[in-house]
Image (cartoon, rainbow, N blue to C red):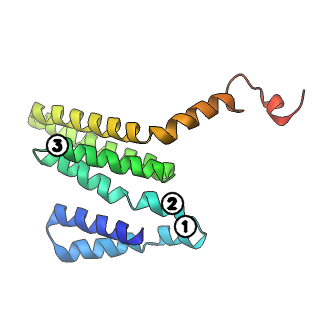
Amino acid sequence: YFFIAGLGMYILVYSLVQEKKAAFISAILYMLNGFMHTFMLNGHINILEGYSMIPFIFLFAYKALKEKNFAAYSILAGIFFALQILAGSILFFFYTVLALGLYFIIHFILSALKGNFKSILKLALVGFLIAVTALSLSSIKLLPVLEFTRMSSRSTSVSFNEYLGEP
């Protein structure tokens, strides 16, 4: 997963700035930062699985907004979102959604200021395709969890005292 994270960051930065040295340095820093070392030394390998998908999500979302073939890139971003969910890295999923949402908001504001309404429509389609792809592919994990939540102590029909075993 370290290699996948580094490869994804290298490709992302290279597609943004077209500079090999900057892409290489950013890939090394992304792979070997202290935040990830903290999780790895404590044995939380599952965090690294979702962490390695983040550059690919941003790469394909960026390409979906910039290139003409936005549907394919949106579906690829959705696939990597689904892989992030299936890896069990829900925390990074929410962080990625937040960061990507900020990127989409900035893109929306800049497009609105320019009066480019085709770009705003494309942004909405890209977001819709990413969400539909990610949720449909990860539904194999999400739907059973939702059903179990309704039957467990988290449901509203079970009181906390009953959950603890008290009458």
**Secondary structure category for the residue under label 3:** helix
Viewer-proximal residue, 67 or 87? 87
**Residue at position x 16%, y 65% in the image:** 17
- Residue 46 in picture, x, y percent from top left: 52, 60
* Vertical placement of residue 45 versus 135, above or below: below
Tell me if 121 is positioned left or right of 80 in this view: left
Q: Residue furthest right?
A: 167
**Residue at position x 78%, y 31% in the image:** 160
Residue on which disc 1 sits: 39
Cα–Cα gap, marks 1 and 2: 7 Å
Q: Which mark is residue 53?
A: none
Amino acid tagged 1: Phe
Residue on which disc 2 sits: 47
**Residue at position x 21%, y 50% in the image:** 62
- Residue 126 in picture, x, y percent from top left: 23, 38
- Residue 63 in picture, x, y percent from top left: 18, 51
Placement of the N terminus among the 4 image quadrants: bottom left
**Marks 1 & 2, CB-CB < 8 Å contact:** yes
**Residue at position x 26%, y 69% in the image:** 10
Amino acid tagged 2: Ile
Residue on which disc 3 sits: 70
**Quarter-of-image position of residue 105:** top left
At label 2, counting other C-alpha atoms closer than 10 Å, the crowd grade (few under 14, some 14-19, many 20 or more) is some
